[in-house]
């Protein structure tokens, strides 16, 4: 199959909408990352998504809507907190897990009784949903396990020959996927951090929002996980990544000692010139939004330069930093070395 990359003109967005209605799967930009979109109500379209990504079929997809009326179509019951969050954060990078309604096919939700829903902020995504008149389910448009795509070319790299169309909406604004919050229990719980933070939601809901353990810690396959996505290795380039937690000086000393053929440092922009080994940067120091924006393209670049081993600087774990840390620790298969242990003794 030929994969076309087309600009988001009216004509091309109509084509995208009509392909969706025919049960095809297409690449669509959102404000977070590019999605691999298919009709949420059509199980054969959903099957194509899982196949194109090579995604384990117990990992549910997010349903994307363009209006609150569409929400009634998808969920069984809208919790009060969902409306409060939607009023403030939709359209935007927040996915809310709610009880699943009848109209979304169960394959999209991997057989669960719940469904993740979000209204994207990206105008192209919203327009395509409107034109199609149906919600689309979309995971990130990468091959399962690889870094999420933040531009149309990254989608092409992974989906070439597998889908008929990618709409090129330029670079994604956020660069990391949406925050996923579950409202299935009384206390909201974050299953995946994003640019909308725990504190953002607490200030709107006026109550505590928890963060699931799996956000920062490894959960085993056997353990019951709140979000199936937590148990898979994710966002990983071919290189073997280790996070080094410590200051810049200790970082440089460590990487210099461990410099072998194909070893790269992954550091913040301002630090690149001080690196004693080849380095790729992922955004500005003390600026988690910039790190979120650049992280996945930096991970893809490591593949392009043929990196075999990577030592990465450790992002902060609060605010938007938690989203960056969550993705990086998964790309590293949870390998982290505390450099300043000896100093603490
Ligand atoms: O920003 C985003 O969310 C992007 C764009 C395309 O919208 N989409 C995205 O989808 O990141 P995906 O499939 O790569 O990640 C969805 C995550 C997975 O970790 C999945 O396990 C979780 O959301 N999820 C979806 N539905 C769920 C449900 N009903 N219960 C628990 N977790 C759910
Ligand atoms: Mg994904």
Image (cartoon, rainbow, N blue to C red):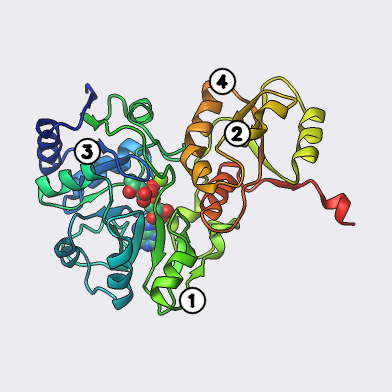
Is 8 in front, or is 227? 8
Name the spot of residue 13 as percent of width and height, x first: 14, 36
Name the spot of residue 94 as percent of width and height, x first: 36, 58
Mark 3 = which residue?
A: 25
Is 277 in front, or is 285? 285
Rendered position, 183 above or below 317: below
Q: Is residue 140 at least partly visible in the picture?
A: yes
Q: Does the residue labelled 3 lie within 8 Å of ligand 1?
A: no
Label 3 neighbour load within 10 Å: few <14, some 14-19, many 20+? many
Is there a contact, CB below 8 Å, between mark 4 and mark 2?
A: no
- Of pointers 4 and 3, the one earlier in the residue sequence: 3
- Of pointers 2 and 3, the one earlier in the residue sequence: 3
Q: Quadrant of the C terminus?
A: bottom right
Mark 1 = which residue?
A: 208
Select label 1 or label 2 by which is in front. 2
Mark 2 = which residue?
A: 269
Ligand 2 resides in the quarter of the picture at top left
Q: Is mark 2 on a helix, strand or loop?
A: helix
């Amino acid at each position: 199959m030929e994969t076309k990359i087309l600009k988001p003109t009216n004509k091309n967005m109509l084509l995208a909408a009509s392909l969706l209605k025919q049960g095809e799967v297409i690449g669509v930009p959102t404000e977070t990352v590019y999605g691999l979109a298919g009709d949420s109500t059509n199980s054969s379209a959903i099957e194509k998504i899982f196949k194109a990504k090579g995604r384990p079929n117990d990992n549910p997809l997010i349903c994307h809507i363009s209006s609150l009326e569409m929400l009634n179509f998808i969920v069984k019951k809208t919790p009060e907190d969902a409306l409060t969050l939607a009023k403030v954060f939709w359209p935007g990078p927040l996915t809310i897990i709610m009880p699943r309604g009848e109209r979304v096919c169960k394959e999209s939700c991997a057989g669960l009784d719940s469904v993740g829903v979000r209204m994207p902020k990206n105008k192209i995504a919203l327009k395509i949903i409107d034109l199609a008149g149906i919600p689309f389910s979309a995971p990130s448009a990468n091959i399962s396990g690889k870094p999420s795509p933040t531009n149309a070319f990254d989608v092409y790299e992974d989906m070439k020959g597998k889908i008929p169309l990618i709409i090129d909406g330029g670079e994604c604004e956020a660069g990391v996927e949406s925050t996923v919050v579950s409202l299935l229990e009384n206390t909201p719980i974050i299953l995946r951090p994003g640019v909308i933070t725990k504190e953002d939601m607490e200030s709107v809901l006026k109550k505590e929002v928890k963060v699931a353990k799996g956000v920062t810690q490894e959960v085993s396959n056997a353990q019951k996980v709140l979000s199936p996505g937590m148990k898979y290795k994710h966002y990983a380039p071919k290189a073997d990544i280790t996070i080094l937690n410590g200051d810049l000086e200790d970082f440089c000393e460590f990487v210099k000692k461990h410099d072998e053929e194909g070893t790269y440092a992954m550091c913040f922009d301002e630090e690149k010139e001080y690196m004693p080994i080849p380095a790729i940067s992922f955004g500005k120091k003390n600026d988690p939004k910039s790190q979120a924006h650049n992280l996945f393209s930096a991970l893809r670049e490591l593949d392009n330069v043929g990196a075999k081993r990577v030592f990465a600087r450790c992002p902060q774990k609060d605010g938007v930093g938690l989203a960056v840390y969550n993705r990086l620790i998964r790309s590293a298969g949870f390998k982290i070395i505390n450099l300043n242990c000896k100093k603490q003794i």
